[in-house]
Image: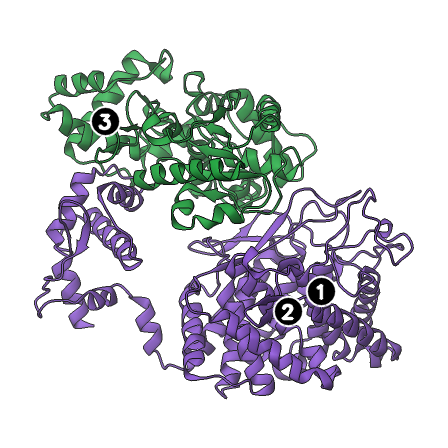
Chain colours: A green, B purple
Amino acid sequence: MITNKDLKMCNEQIFSYSAAYQVPFFGREDAIEEMQELNNNLKPAETLVISQPLGTGKTFLVNYMISSGKLDVPTGASFLTVRGITEEPESMEAFPGDTLVVDEADIKTPVKKLVKGLGMLAEYLEESSRKAILLGDYSLKNQNISGELKKTVSLLKFGDMDKVFLKGVLEERFKHFLDLKEFQIEEVMEEELLDYLAPGWMKSVNSFRGIFSLLQQVVANEKYVRYNGEKAFLTVEMVHDFLCNDDNLQLDTEQRKFFELFCEYMKEMYPKGSGITTGFKVEELYDLAKNGGINKNLQEFTEDILYPFATADLLVSTGVPEYEGKGSSFIRRPAPYVPSLRLLLSLM
Amino acid sequence: MEDKIVSYALLFSGSKRSDVKLLYRLIYQLMDSISQEEIVDMDEFSLLVEEAAGKRPVSVNYAKELLETAGCFVFDGKTWEYNQSLNLGNGTVAWEQFQELFEGEKNVRKTEGEMDVQKSAIILGIEWCVHMVQLAKEGGMEGLPAFLRCGKQDSLIGKKVAGTATSDALSLLCNGIDYIKECEIEPEVLASSFAFLVEQVLNCQHREEGWDKGGFFPLEDQPEADHPTVDATCLAIMALCDFYANRSALEEKLHVQVETESNEIEDAVLTGLDFLFRMQQPMGSYGIYRYEQEYPDGIHLDRECETGTAEPNENCTRMVLSAMGVSKGSGIFDARERFELYGTCSEVIQKSYSYLKNHLAEDNEISVWAPYFGTQVRNYPYADMVVSAARVCRSMIPVWWQCEEEREQIKKYYADFLAFWKQEGRNRSGGIGKYTFKTPGKEKYSVGTYTWQSYADMIAAFTVLQGYNLFGMALDKEEWNLLEEVVCETMELQHAHGHWNAPRSSNPFCAVTLAAIELLKEYRIAKGLE
């Protein structure tokens, strides 16, 4: 039996979403196979691109492939970053082996450095005839950002975050950190909670970071999981209660109004999120806001409510970050939007 | 203090707590960026807002208004700049004065009876360590885990034990006896902590007959290691020797009595040394481990062997040097009348030192040690070089005592290291050095690697101070300033709970806590306070 104490002691490890702990690798067989093939066939100056949302396990996958000898990249070398390339261009030359690995080509990098860094990478690859593996988010799908990289191949079979995958990952982690030979996730987690954490309509944008940071916070909270010898069991109600009592939200008046409108709308039209397909456009959400009495123009609504909601992980952007070129704004989290796990679980 | 409070009141004039908190974070982020000479345009600013706002949905416009109302920073249409006309009621506030407003606890520490600040920090660190040991003991663990959690009350992460964390904790306590006297710890608690750590370190040893006999496992520090490793064995031997050598002092000064029999510790150290003797590579170096198959005739490396081969690395080689020296000085050889071991250890020291002497990297007439005995300094990040070279230098103590004829050379190594460390233009401040290694799996070395991270300056400063304390290494004003700066930075890194964290992490870490305390102790010796 896994107790609350066991769970609390291993909380950060089991629900780790960074490189801080050595977590067991699970799944992604198709991605591994495709990556090996693409990498083996990479031509000089070509780049293998992995463009997936933040926190979905790109860096973890590449690290695993290198450490298990599935990618011909010397072990132990720290990955380059796009920002780092702009600050220390000589780091590209110093990177060992034939193939550079460049990470963080994403919205966490200032757009000027993103564009400049990718340009510098492209130039260096042409000059040196070396190759690269480039990890980033959907920013890489914007030609105004990544256009300098002319010779690219993309990983297509990265794999989505579905319930089966999430279960497998969790089971491996529980077995590893708690030294268990046999384990089923249903022993510590309500089936319905798993349904909420990995809904089908969210599988292409759902992230380990989103799921595990939430579970870590719930488990760390004494109100929900006490440090005792009782059987550990996480439920939807627990997570719902945690989110409803989360002091960090702190919405202003108009934001609170829209939040309530949106929640009502979701409950009515998409209970538990079922039926959501492509996500909501700005205009749809604006109509909802206007009809609900929110008195802002479209730009104000977008800047004061929508974008902050996306940044605060109430909405998840499924669009490609927008950038028209030098001098224009970088819209990191554009529409369409789907509700985040955080919002969905607070709705029930 | 009064002036400061008034300044804060004028700056943070919001009515909502959440806005004041947000403003504080924005100011801090912006100040940090500008002081590092970064250009903060609106795109960069939006990232700062994200960071400062956390889970609160804050629009960039709102954050901009908040900052502009505070008046300390202005946006000129392109970038954010400090408002040189800022007036907080007492004339304009210069940029340096503004930064000082946010230095907070740093200033409090600095003025808190200057010299004794380091002593207080050491005591706090030791108290924290004992507290963690007690938690592990009460939690039924067989040692300390690799990771610890800092919260309202610090706690352990995970249920698996890390061999080196346990050894580090024992070393930390053994070397802090004079400070432990001033800790507010009951003798029974101390005794149980020492007993627990000694027992658990001993439990990490491989006892079965065979090639691995005597070696110590790293356990969770290297989860894939199926064999004892050189580094874990060295740390365990040094910790056990530290305990053995200080046992009487523990009893006399602290009334700490540990039941573990001396001969049990002696056995462990002696068999541990046997393991290290077997692990030495023919030319005198050490890798993380040595499979029997690597050198089938004991002399020639079979590069094609199925286990893979361990590259000689400077970290393991220097650790063995230190372990040999500490073992010789522990009194164990005399107690067991194993006098021949003095000679054996001396031979290992001689051979390892010989290897080190012949495998340096050159950089503008400076000779230092590079990771894995590389020959080109420019192939490595500066911080990695500093950590490698500093660690090897500090392990020269046994050579200093054994080979008097090498003393001038050793002084030169220290001088070269100092010259390398303090080179202008190097990105010195806050550097984190990495040591990367493979681990011995059941059948062969791992393909993947492990990385230990360290604060390069902390390790470097210790080495330089050690040179000063050992042989009066000459230090000019600039070099003393550098050392003072690093000691100050080290103090600032200490958490209020007493621990130091792993680099780039909010997790307490025994190895870093030990390194920090070692540095502070060495500093106090240099200042004549110990």
Q: Which mark is residue B392?
A: 2
Q: Are marks 2 and 1 in contact (CB under 8 Å)?
A: yes
Q: Which mark is residue B317?
A: 1
Q: Position of residue A310 (x, y in %)?
A: 29, 30
The answer for which chain carries disc 2 is B
- Asked which quadrant contains residue B514, the reply is bottom right
- Asked which quadrant contains residue B275, the reply is bottom right
Q: Which quadrant holds the N terminus of chain B?
A: bottom left
Q: Is residue A43 visible?
A: yes
Q: Secondary structure at mark 1?
A: helix
The answer for which chain carries disc 3 is A
**Amino acid at circle 1:** Thr
B193 over A149 or under it: above or below: below
Q: Position of residue B332 (x, y in %)?
A: 80, 77
Q: Position of residue B153 (x, y in %)?
A: 45, 56
**Amino acid at circle 2:** Val
Residues at marks 3 and 2, common chain?
Answer: no
Q: Which residue is mark 3?
A: A259
Q: CA distance from mark 3 to mark 1?
A: 61 Å
